[in-house]
Image: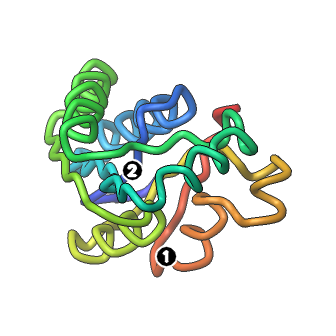
Amino acid sequence: MGDYKVVTVGTDGSSSARKAVVRAAEVAADSGARLMIICAYETRDPSSHRDQAEAERALGDEAYKIIGASPAEETLRSARDEAIRAGAQNVDTVAVQGDPTEAIVEKSELYKADLVVVGNKGLASFAGRFLGSVPQAVSRKSRTDVLIVHTT
C-alpha cells in the first residue's frame, strides 16, 4: 500500500463504517502505522428536534447520526476492539463534536495522517448525489491520500 505512519478513519458505528475501520486497521497493521479512529457527534438541540426527526424519516438509512458524547465513546470502543482484532497494534480514538467531514479532515491534519480511510456509504444514494456525502467531501477536502472502501 505505502509507507504510512498515521492512518485515520471515520466511524459512526454503521456496518459500512465498521468495514472501513477493518480495512484501515489492515492497512495500519501492514505499514506498522498508528491508527486514529474518529467519531463525530452532535448535541441535541431541543429546538431542532422536530426538524431532525423529519429529516431522518425522509432519509431513512442515510440518516445515521450519533447524538451525544456517550454514544460516540461507545462507538469508538467497539471500533477500537474491531481494529485490534483486524491486526492494528497502535490504536487511538477521538470523539469530536460537529460535522463528520470537518472532524475527519481536521483531525487527520492535526495528527499528520498519511492516509484517510472512509467507507463509500452515501456516494450512490439520492441523498449523497443531491446533498453530498461524507466520503465525497473528505476526498475533496483532504490534503493527503484518501482510500474510499467499497462497503455497501
Left or right: 73 with respect to 23?
left
Vertical placement of 152 versus 102: above or below? above
Vertical placement of 53 versus 147: above or below? above
Left or right: 8 with respect to 35?
right
Where is residue 57 shown, x and y percent of the image? 69, 38
Left or right: 84 with respect to 118?
left
Query: Could you tell me how far apart the alpha carbons at marks 1 and 2 are, in whole angstroms?
Result: 12 Å
The residue at 21%/46% (across/down) is 69
Nearer the observer, 110 or 131: 131
Q: Which residue is mark 1?
A: 142
Where is residue 29 shown, x and y percent of the image? 29, 37
The residue at 74%/66% (across/down) is 131
- Quadrant in which residue 127 is drawn: bottom right
Q: At label 2, which amino acid type do we have?
A: Val
Q: Which residue is mark 2?
A: 9
- Quadrant in which residue 115 is drawn: bottom left
Nearer the observer, 30 or 76: 76
- Quadrant in which residue 56 is drawn: top right
Where is residue 78 shown, x and y percent of the image? 27, 25
Q: At label 1, which amino acid type do we have?
A: Ser
